[in-house]
Amino acid sequence: MIRSILRTLSILFVLFAPVLNAAPADAKGFGAYLVDVKPEEVFPNADRFGAREGTPPAMPAFKGDEELGYVFETTDIGYSGKPIKLLVGMDKSGVIVGAKVFEHHEPILLVGIPPEKLTAFVASLIGRNVIAKVEGEANAVDAISGATVTAIVINDGISRAALQVAKAHGLAGFAASAAAAADTRTRSLAEIPFAKADWQTMLGDGSVRRLHLLNSDVDTAFQKIGVGSPEPYARAGVPTEQFVDLYVAMVSIEGIGRNLLGDAEYDRLRQWLKPGQQAVLIAANGDYSFRGSGFVRGGIFDRFQLEQDQTSVLFKDHDYRRLGDLPAGVPAFKEVGLFRIPEGVVFDPTTDWQIKLLAQRPTGPTQKAFTSFPLSYHLPDRFISVSAPPAPAPAAATPAAEEPEAASANALWKQIWRSRVVDIVILSLSLTLLTLIFFFQDVLVKKAKFFTALRIGYLIFSVVWIGGWAQAQLSVVNVLTFTSAFLGGQFRWEQFLLEPLIFILWCATAVSLLFWGRGPFCGWLCPFGSLQELLNQLARRLGIRQITVPFHWHERLWPIKYIIFLALFGLSLNEFALAEQFAEVEPFKTAVLLRFMREWPFVIWAMGLLVAGLFIERFFCRYLCPLGAALAIPGRMRLFEWLKRRKQCGLECQLCAKRCPVQAIHPLGQINPNECVYCMQCQVIYWDDSTCPPLLLKKTGRGKKPAPRPVSTPAPISAPAAAPAPVMPKVTETTPV
């Protein structure tokens, strides 16, 4: 049977090898596309590129002698620690006309999005104006359903690079605004006496701005991005009914805030704000809630954001105050809230800004499409004071090119953490629970049924939430990425902080290695490992016969995973992209992240490993998992021995060794910490006096030593008595007849 399984796996590996040997993504440096990329691939109608020029560098795209726009490159660092290199074409009006990924190292690390969707996401940016913010124009939002770190990095990188190129080369009206560029006058908030004003007056002079949308307006906006009615996934709204009637005002300005809020509420607002901090009022009627479900989940308002220049602000619950009734003369609203600009955000109240309202529409059972509606706000001129320009300050040293990029990366990872605060809390609570389970294991394992139910429940949580929902499956590629960045001198915490759940899991795993070895992750937190164990438990209940690998074969098979890990590690030092491809020996991406929605060789490989696990529990974990090997090596440095053993273990009793699900107990009784997944089955037996043979013998009394015999006083030594004479048999003579 074992030979048949090994032969089957060999056949699967042969089928899988052509995919592993497929050519990697193009790895061309900046400028190599002059030969390898045709101009029309990134800039339609262009027939040639000009020379690179400007800072940041960009190349003009020509059709004959006509200059159409510019092509530039983005090289932002993705979660893999390697640059995601794209070529982007932008015309003179600031519209993206083409985009092509020509080098990346992200396929292994995509959280639930295959490479085809990444390519489609990049293509979806075409046709969007990343510079202009046109009021009333419905723009597709820089997000996709289940957006990944990779998509966020690409989107952020293109937006920043496009703005820099436009300013450097005079695109999107930057060169035409010479008068505005020459205007160096200082603008500040004017100190004017308070004047009473009613609602209609403030609405007329722009102190209050309005966004009014009917359901038909929203339908038209979605049709522009190719999305029709939400039916049958959601009820479509009546076209003539009101979708939202939204109003925005900057109430930190006394002339606006005191009129809208009243004296008492305005005074409370000033106490809530710090000096120089601004606040806006948002009020709305209609079927659509601007607060959204994010507020309920964790205090994040995910249906709108404030934008000024290239700064975006997402509000959290601690920057929000709910209001009741407004003063007389102000209309009643279904939703009213005060939002203060968070500390640390650079915001100029004298400069135009906008609120971008996000609308969503289901396109499938779990898929959604997004579009946005901007509402621009300009503070009335009477609240702005304009003065002569200040004297020029001494020229400061130009910061290094890396500093803006580092600042942007910092802002990006912080934004991602804020957006996933609920998931972070759930994961942290689950890790706290697991820590308590380990610290109080001696108490829990004494209640065998309760502990078994607790473990099965945690394994289900690992599969369903950590793997299925949060998609936080660790991989050996994470290890290779970390070591590659560290050894290559490119280590930056920011790149690892871009995925908060992965980062938290790695920190927890690193700490647990010092206490318990690889067991906490491999035995409890790994979604694929948990899936194997649950399927094997189901197979046992269905009566599927289990295969017990002879121990002499078992100890010769488990080094295979160490060989795989060392081979991947050595390969990553020279050919990281190739190491990523061969790391697909892990089925994690196929089974957990992509839910088997991949090419058939990957699916067959993952299914084959799960089928093998039905007969040999945790087959992949035992013999093939390179991540388990990578964790087992530093796990040797653990500081404590938590698993208890008796002197009879292995010598007089083999029960724990026979019941260990991964055969981590040597026939002589020692537990191999490199192979132990810390299921604690041996500890359940250890404390059970009805199962553990030494305890059972002691309980029944059969394990006690016999009492010693009483010692009698010896008799005095005397001369030996004479031996009695042998008794001879008596012979009777008979007369023969």
Image (cartoon, rainbow, N blue to C red):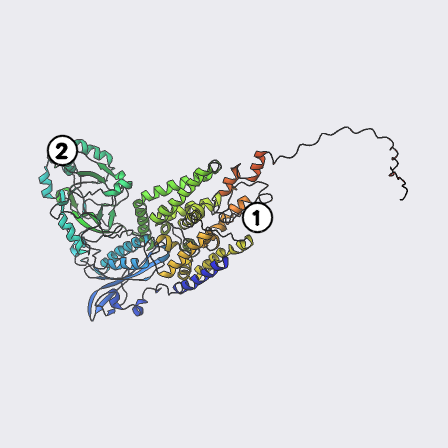
Question: In this picture, is 553 found above or below 418?
Answer: below
Image quadrant holding the C terminus, namely top right
The image shows residue 650 at horizontal and vertical percentages of: 58, 45
Which numbered circle lies on residue 327?
2
Name the foreground residue: 109 vs 366: 366
- Whether residue 82 is visible to the viewer of this picture, yes or no, is no
Near mark 1 (Cα within 10 A), the count class, few <14, some 14-19 or many ≥20, is some
- Circles 2 and 1: CB distance less than 8 Å? no
Please tell me whether mark 2 sits on a helix, a strand or a loop: loop
Q: Tag 2: residue type?
A: Pro
Does residue 122 appear to the left or right of 726 in the view shown?
A: left
In the picture of the structure, the residue carrying the numbered disc 1 is 667
Name the foreground residue: 105 vs 595: 595
Please tell me whether mark 1 sits on a helix, a strand or a loop: loop
Q: Tag 1: residue type?
A: Pro
* Residue at image location 45% in from the left, 46% down from the top: 523
The image shows residue 618 at horizontal and vertical percentages of: 45, 51
The image shows residue 347 at horizontal and vertical percentages of: 23, 45
- Whether residue 517 is visible to the viewer of this picture, yes or no, is yes
